[in-house]
Image (tube, grey):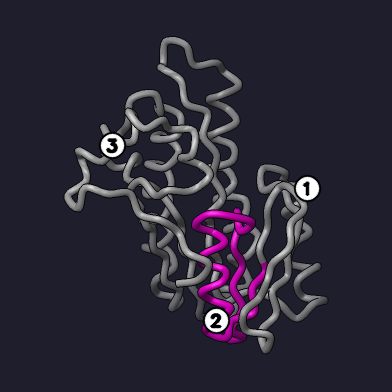
Amino acid sequence: MNKVAFITGASRGIGLSIANALNVNGYDVVGTARGVFEFSPVNQDSKMVAMQLDITSRDEVKNLPSVLKELDLMPSIVINNAGITADQLFLRMSDENWDNVIDTNLNGVFNITKAFIKHLVKSKSGRVINISSVSGLMGNPGQVNYSSAKAGVIGFTKSIALELGSRNIRCNAIAPGFIDTDMTSYLDDEAKAEIVKGIPLQKLWFTKRYI
């Protein structure tokens, strides 16, 4: 298959680091975000295509395969990375905060994977990599919505791995701990200190331009 990777939430943070790492290693990269953005490729021999896309919109997502076929950029690797937070204690959590986080962090994974799965099955090869979170394994106060979505991503991944393994498609979930990105920038020093207490290496990790 072509060395093409499709990554959601690729404009910053973990997604951008993954995109740059794949670019350095010779992959053509298609990255998406809700807003307009641009890549700055290190390896000029590989394509990096930035696309504006709302992964919660099934009308937008369903057009992806035809668009990428025309560009000869159908992916061999699909990375579901996009995620948002809307933290609040459960007693005060609004319906909107619950729905928005579940829609992006869990339904978005369904929408994107569904769009490409027939292509991967037909190719009898490929990878689906879903970025979950340690919050989906352990829970986290104030993140009932986020933790629920990320736990759902783990269950989703386990199930499709069992369905697709016989088709030579590997499906994996990665559950990072707290990483110093834009998503965690709202945490004050006191909150970060409390988080660090529970990390064996006693520090937050930082994303880099490329890995």
- The reply to whether dot 2 and dot 1 touch (C-beta < 8 Å) is no
Is 122 situated left or right of 36 in this image? left
For the point 75% across and 60% down, which residue is it? 51
Q: Label 3: which residue?
A: 195
Q: Could you tell me which quadrant the C terminus lies in?
A: bottom left
Measured along the vertical axis of the image, is residue 23 above or below residue 161? Answer: below
Is 134 situated left or right of 108 in this image? left
Q: CA distance from mark 2 to mark 3?
A: 32 Å
Q: Magenta stretch: residue 19 in it?
A: yes
Give the crowd class for mark 2: few <14, some 14-19, many >=20 residues within 10 Å.
Answer: some
Rendered location of residue 150, percent (x, y): 42, 42
Which mark is nearer the camera, 3 or 1? 3
The secondary structure type at the circle numbered 3 is: helix
Which mark is nearer the camera, 2 or 1? 2
Q: CA distance from mark 3 to mark 1?
A: 39 Å
Give the crowd class for mark 1: few <14, some 14-19, many >=20 residues within 10 Å.
Answer: few
- The reply to whether dot 3 and dot 1 touch (C-beta < 8 Å) is no
Q: Label 2: which residue?
A: 24
The secondary structure type at the circle numbered 1 is: helix
The stretch in magenta equals 1-30
Q: CA distance from mark 2 to mark 1?
A: 33 Å
Measured along the vertical axis of the image, is residue 149 above or below residue 33? Answer: above
Rendered location of residue 115, percent (x, y): 65, 60
Q: Label 1: which residue?
A: 59
